[in-house]
Amino acid sequence: MHILGKIDALLVRVIHPVLIVIGLAVALMLVIGILTRMFGAPVFGLEEIMLLAIMWFYMLGAALASRERSHLSADFVRVISKNPKVWRVAALISTAISLVIAVLFSTWAWALFSFGLERGQSTPVFGIPWWISQSSLFVASVLFIVYLVRDLIHEIRGDDWQSGDPAAEVE
Amino acid sequence: SDKKYKLVLTSEAGDRESVLGGALRDWASRIEESSDGRIRVNVFYQGELGGQQELFDQLVKGNVHMMITWPQTSYDQRIGANYIPYLVMGWEDAIESFGREGWVRDVLEPIYQDIGLKYFGPFPEGFGGIATKGRYATSYEEAQGLKVRSQPIFPLPQTLQAMGFQAVPIDWAEVYTSIQTGVVDGDSSNVIYWDYEYFRDQLDYFVQSSHNFSSYSLLMNSGTWEEMDDEDRGIIDSAAIAVIDQQFENAKAEDDKWIAAAQEAGMEYIVPTPEQKAAWVERVRAEVWPQAEEALGKEIMDVVRANASVPE
Amino acid sequence: MGALIAIIAVVVLMMIGVPVVFSFATMTLILSIAYDVDISSLMTTGFWSVNSVILVALPLFVMTGYLMQSGGIARRLVEFVEALVGRSRIGMGTSMVVTCGIFGAISGTASAAVASVGSIMIDPMEKHGYARGYTSALLGISSLLGLLIPPSITMILYAVVTRQSVAACFLATVGPGILLMIFLSLLNRLHVSRKLGGDTEKAPWGQRLSESASAGWRAIPALLLPVIILGGIYGGFATPTEAAAISVALAIPIGLFVYREQTLRGIGEAVINAATTTGVIMIILVFSFVASRILTLERVPQDLTDLLLGTFSNPLLILLVVNIFLILMGMIMDDVSVIAIISPLMVPVMAEIGVDPIHFAAIIGTSIVIGANSPPMAPILFMACRVGRVGMSEVISPAFYFMAFAAFPVMLITTYYSPLALFLPRLLGFIQ
Ligand code: NA
Ligand code: NA
């Protein structure tokens, strides 16, 4: 687990600044769009760059949510049962199902990415290939798998942790 | 053949009541009739299956089997040949150039084939114009400061800029609000039908700049096409030709009908004088055609230059 | 049939605790098997649907919410409203409701209001005699004003999914939002006088006036934000997405230079939080768009419409069935899922019985107020519990009180009295 922890820390160190740059840059591009339009010289193509970038923002954000176990889920089991054994079984089943689905998702996302790569669809103004943003789905799916494997290991070991638990770190 | 098919036919534009919507139904019912219901065609109207880019992707991938669509340039820039400004100058010229024996078809068909699509022919709609609110422009100078929505398809924005307008890219779903609130002053490159049907309470003027000839394409996924035997291909193809022929017959009358309807609704319909139009043609051809040559290649532009007519 | 199995599967998976995104992916998988479509080639649907300029407003409005919290903007708003209502016992509850409403005019989500208003107000309200469970429940439901008072990411989602104008959808929920504020304030007044032994003394008028003036002065930059955002959208300077960018671009300097509470770290955290919040939504959307595309291709919405129209002859009855259906779906699903899956199914039904899609936006918006606070899938109520540091058992009964006597009546009035939703969109010319 030690090496996984290092990879995780490195990932976060890369993802955080990328997200901050994209998030602020998108806001800035839109403001520039308004100002240039007001002053009579609208810039064409800003929005395709914005869209290419924002997809990475969404997908890396979703991956971070996996890391923090903050994907939306219902706490129904904990409401109807007070038995920690039931919780554990439910958690194991749900993580296992999620993992299987995440693996399938990665194949679907790969199909999307490789199709884009092969056929070279590109944006209308600058002709930037769309696979640049389509690949973000595949990256997200791989990160989902990584963190779900982590979760599964924890749950098999019997650690009790809930969604949004700050202890959800890889040791 | 006794093979059964369930095909999906759609378009990114055209609701149930529009001419395009009617053409979708027409194509579908002709196919179902001549195949005695063996080939079933499910029609989906504007927006029911997603936006332009997605639908074109789905057509190429084969989840959508047939479309009547504004050609998309995302797979191949050369499709932009369909949108070269001031390509044709009048109805007769347009019908000849875009028609079944016309030179535009010779340019487009092989490109579609490369993308993986079977091209049946064009679905002409008419000449595009500039519809605006408050004031209008018939020249480069008058157009200064007028912001109009443009489709983000090369070289349409470039054309509007060359004509003196500010081209603003806005999603079709937000165009009405944007005109209403003043984010843009109007819409561009559409035939009057769309501006009348969707924005008539907002727009005051329609200037028949005719910088583009709006023409959709009847397309089918190549995989689906090749899977079919000759009999079934014949059914699809002759149904398509019937739809196309009828539209060539009706397009001008249809466009005239909407011009009259728009005028009746209080929209002012303005035809630029030959001098005004010539000035726009000159500017646009000087500025945009070299850009088009860069994007589409010399080969295509040589064909264009050889065939494009001189303004009357 | 395939559709039914898929929806049952989603419900079961969510109950076990499978995250929404993987439950939806499973639903998509089942649909693709049942209707024999190639799911990997349908991913393009998910991609292009999410790849939308209009949706970019979402992360930006979420970001603004977090920036308000870390930049001291939220606190100025609370202080101003508290001074206005005179710091009495009833006034504290009213001010929680009203602050959430004003907060909602800047932020697009409920969660930002829960976090900032909750952390500022729950303790002082306890000192005034309110039980924490009650306060948390009031917070949970008031925070939903964030999606009724524009801007609202829920309405942006609805507009994108059903292809309506964002600006028009924004206006549809204003009336219901104000009505909900009134209902909540009255219920709170009733609760205080019947259960807490009545109101305490208000600050004297002179003091109230001077405090309001000075707190109001300090809150001016914060109060200008909604004016600029909504003025930008309805005054023709900006599209909703651009207005969202303006709100980010203003919230940062206000926090940094006017209130001097914002830090670079705070800004970075706000952006990252916005990324995870919207990432969670977008990845759900990817799958729900694919799922609803399969349903449309198989004409399930039409079948559903035919079924409803065939079973019930009276449009009012159909509306009632739709109301109940929305509440049930809201219990087991989160707001994003309800909008993404249910609204495309329902809009054709509505069209058939003559309900304007903009009116339906308001109906679905008010149903989400109930859904987001009804377990098992009650993300907002759970969050209010966390912020209020109370257990679920203590909030359930006050939450039910607010839903039964405020949120539910507001939903019914919105459903059966269409001018409440349609007056503003009509006034501003968005619909005829
Ligand atoms: Na709001
Ligand atoms: Na719920």
Image (cartoon, rainbow, N blue to C red):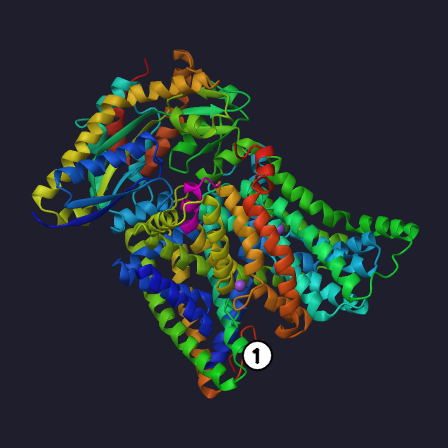
Between A42 and C12, which is closer to the camera in this rendering? C12
Which residue shows up at 61% across the image and 58% down it? Answer: C110
Which amino acid does the dot numbered 1 rest on?
Ala
Query: Which region of the structure is painted magenta?
Result: C344-355
Query: For this view, does B140 lie left or right of residue A164?
Result: left
Residue C309 vs residue B202, the one in the foreground: C309
Provide the residue designation for mark 1. Answer: A167
Residue at 61 percent across and 55 percent down: it is: C407
Residue B177 at x, y = what percent? 53, 36
**Residue at the image position 77 percent from the left and 63 percent from the top:** C194
In the rendered image of this protein, does residue C136 appear above or below residue B100?
below
- In this view, the residue in front, A151 or A171, is A151
Figure check: C402 above or below C243: below
Answer yes or no: is residue C319 visible. Answer: yes
**Residue placed at 45% from the left, 60% from the top?**
C284
Give how far across and how far down residue A106 sits, in percent.
35, 66
Q: Nearer the viewer, residue B153 or C98?
A: C98
- Tell me where residue A32 sits by quadrant: top right
Q: Left of B189 or right of it: where is B232?
A: left
Residue C350 lies in the magenta stretch: yes
Is C293 placed above or below A148 here?
above
- Predominant SS of the magenta segment: helix
Q: Is residue C112 visible?
A: no
Q: Where is residue C21 drawn, in percent x and y?
A: 44, 65
Whether label 1 lies within 8 Å of ligand 2 gets the answer no
Relative side of C268 to C29, left or right = right
Query: Is residue A94 located in the magenta-colored stretch of the structure?
Result: no
Q: Chain of mark 1?
A: A
